[in-house]
Image: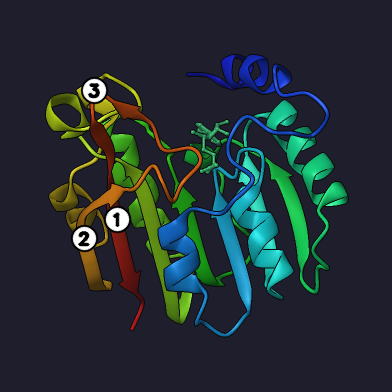
């Protein structure tokens, strides 16, 4: 999908309510929660749920997406969030396949950026180089096995992840986890459940050490 198509999707999200859940991804919250707040980059931030959650925990966040409408919703959500925010958010409008940040980060997150396989490999390889020494990379997306035994997400296998693919893309980092993750719909308001199947995510958790 191009930026205009995403703008159209986000324009359906009115009153700052957002297209996606207002909650951060549960696995992201679990992994990042214990980390000391520093600088973070949220790649393909969408309407900002992870960026806002990070800023509420003191992170100095750069949040990038190519949908201007998505970022408008994100800004509105951030302005109306009830939790006090000790960190900051720098919203950046850019196509991440052609953008490089001006600095390196303690944390790079990317959730549900479903590009064609080579583009996914490229962005993860580039994101690996956007980490400071000791920095953490966290990538979560829809797994290819959703097509056969999961639920939700794009139905085109070309844009779906596998653990092996994410592991290979992060070559050079120390990989703590490259595995599937069952997204429990009871815990995640976004979690679809089709025909009794829960959604399967792919998780990459790696560190630049
Ligand atoms: C499924 S949404 C996920 C949003 C957010 N990460 C979340 O988990 O709530 C995918 C996002 O990727 C963005 N996106 C897709 N391709 C992009 C690109 N080439 N550059 C920047 N953003 C892109 C879309 O605009 C959309 O906001």
Residue plotted at (32% across, 66% down)? 205
Mark 1: C-beta under 8 Å from nearest atom of ligand 1: no
Extreme right residue here?
Answer: 79
Against 142, is 155 above or below?
above
Dot label at residue 57: none
Against 140, is 195 above or below?
above
> 206 left or right of 108?
left
Task: Say few, some or many: other residues with alpha carbon within 10 Å of mark 1 (under 14 / 14 to 19 / 20 or more).
Answer: many
Residue plotted at (74% across, 49% down)? 91
Q: Nearer the viewer, residue 134 or 82?
A: 82
Which mark is first along the chain, 3 or 1? 3
Cα–Cα gap, marks 1 and 3: 23 Å
Whether residue 76 is visible, yes or no, is yes
> 182 left or right of 97?
left
Please state the horizontal and vertical placement of residue 140, each as a whole percent of the image.
37, 50
Q: Secondary structure at mark 2?
A: strand
Cα–Cα gap, marks 2 and 1: 6 Å
Marks 1 and 3 in Cβ contact (< 8 Å): no
Viewport quadrant of the C terminus: bottom left
Q: Give the residue at mark 1.
A: 203
Which mark is first along the chain, 2 or 3? 2
Please state the horizontal and vertical placement of residue 178, each as a whole percent of the image.
21, 60
> 22 left or right of 135?
right
Colour setting: rainbow
Q: Secondary structure at mark 1?
A: strand
Q: Give the residue at mark 2.
A: 178
Residue plotted at (64% across, 65% down)? 54
Q: Give the residue at mark 3.
A: 195
Marks 2 and 1 in Cβ contact (< 8 Å): yes
């Amino acid at each position: 999908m191009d930026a205009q198509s995403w703008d159209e999707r986000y324009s359906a999200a009115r009153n700052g309510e957002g297209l996606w859940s207002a909650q951060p991804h549960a696995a992201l919250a679990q992994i990042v929660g214990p980390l000391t707040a520093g600088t973070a980059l949220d790649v393909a931030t969408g309407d900002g749920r992870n960026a806002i959650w990070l800023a509420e925990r003191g992170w100095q966040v750069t949040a990038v997406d190519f949908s201007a409408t998505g970022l408008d919703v994100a800004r509105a959500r951030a302005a109306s969030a009830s939790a006090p925010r000790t960190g900051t958010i720098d919203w950046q409008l850019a196509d991440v396949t052609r953008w490089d940040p001006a600095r390196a980060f303690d944390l790079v997150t990317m959730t549900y950026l479903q590009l064609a396989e080579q583009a996914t490999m490229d962005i993860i390889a580039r994101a690996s180089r956007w980490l400071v020494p000791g920095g953490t990379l966290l990538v979560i997306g829809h797994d290819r096995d959703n097509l056969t035994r999961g639920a939700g997400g794009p139905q085109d296998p070309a844009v779906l992840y596998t653990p092996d693919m994410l592991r290979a893309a992060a070559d050079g980092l120390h990989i703590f986890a490259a595995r599937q993750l069952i997204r429990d719909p009871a815990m995640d308001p976004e979690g679809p459940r089709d025909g009794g199947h829960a959604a399967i995510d792919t998780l990459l958790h790696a560190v630049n050490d």
